[in-house]
Amino acid sequence: MNIVLLGAPGAGKGTQADLLSAYLQVPHVATGDLFREALRNNTCLGQQAKEYMDRGELVPDSITVAMVRERLAQPDCARGVILDGFPRTIEQAEALDALLSELDRQLDLVVFIRVRPEVLVERLSGRWICHDCQGVYHTLFNPPEVPGVCDACDGELFQRVDDRPETQRYRIEVYLRQTAPLVEWYRERGLLVEVDGEREIDRIQEDLREAVARVRAAG
Ligand code: AMP
């Protein structure tokens, strides 16, 4: 199954993608994580992406699509993938269709996780990420057992530079301008399922699994 999770920064895409990835046994591919990893490894890709990421802007489509193409061609993606944070523009959505058809595959489902902007800001402010496994925590909604330490792998937790208040607001604006139009784009193509992202993590996950089951039953 090839699934896209769509939603604003802070909507919970990463948390839901991790759970769904464990359930379906297909990789969770997050373009933001791929860029941050490239940056940690000081690669050319990381250097190219850094200035855009620090400002909260989108990395140019050509760079992003090339990175996704490379990742989707890896053997662990052969059974399917859960994409988080990609596509983020109509051009990227068109490129994804082309990439999948090159691999003789197609997109099966797009889940839009809907969260109001005021709630997004609150979520981004308390967000902590694991350095090692990229697990996502929240001071209020999903705290780690030991502050600053990942429950899953004991890695150190950090707050993202681009989760700072000024950059947060800008990232939400960028989302509304460039990514939100994808909701209607995918709805018109009959691929979209919308879920209320302002509920318990487990309730949202149940909706995602139901959506997957419906697609499987129809296919
Ligand atoms: P995220 O972790 O998904 O919030 O992404 C962090 C940052 O990585 C974004 O603010 C962008 O600068 C960059 N990024 C991630 N995914 C994409 C994408 N699909 N297109 C362009 N830039 C992206």
Image (spheres, rainbow, N blue to C red):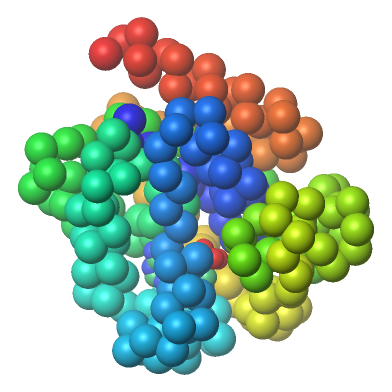
Looking at the figure, which quarter contains the N terminus? top left
Which of the pair 76/174 is nearer the observer?
A: 76
Residue at image position (89%, 51%) is 145
Callout count: 0
Residue at image position (42%, 53%) is 29
Which of the pair 57/68 is nearer the observer?
A: 68
In this view, the residue farthest toward the front is 154
Whether 204 is drawn above or below 49: the answer is above
Q: At which x and y percent is residue 122?
A: 81, 60
Whether 99 is drawn above or below 205: the answer is below
Q: Viewed as shown, does residue 145 lie left or right of 68?
A: right
Q: Viewed as shown, does residue 127 lie left or right of 168?
A: right
Q: At which x and y percent is residue 50?
A: 47, 87
Q: Viewed as shown, does residue 40 lie left or right of 19?
A: left
Whether 11 is drawn above or below 167: the answer is above
Looking at the figure, which quarter contains the C terminus? top left
Q: At which x and y percent is residue 104?
A: 10, 38
Q: At which x and y percent is residue 31?
A: 42, 63
Whether 120 is drawn above or below 210: the answer is below
Which of the pair 60/30 is nearer the observer?
A: 30
Residue at image position (78%, 34%) is 200
Q: Is residue 215 visible?
A: yes
* Quarter of image, res 16: top right
Q: Is residue 178 visible?
A: no
Residue at image position (45%, 33%) is 25
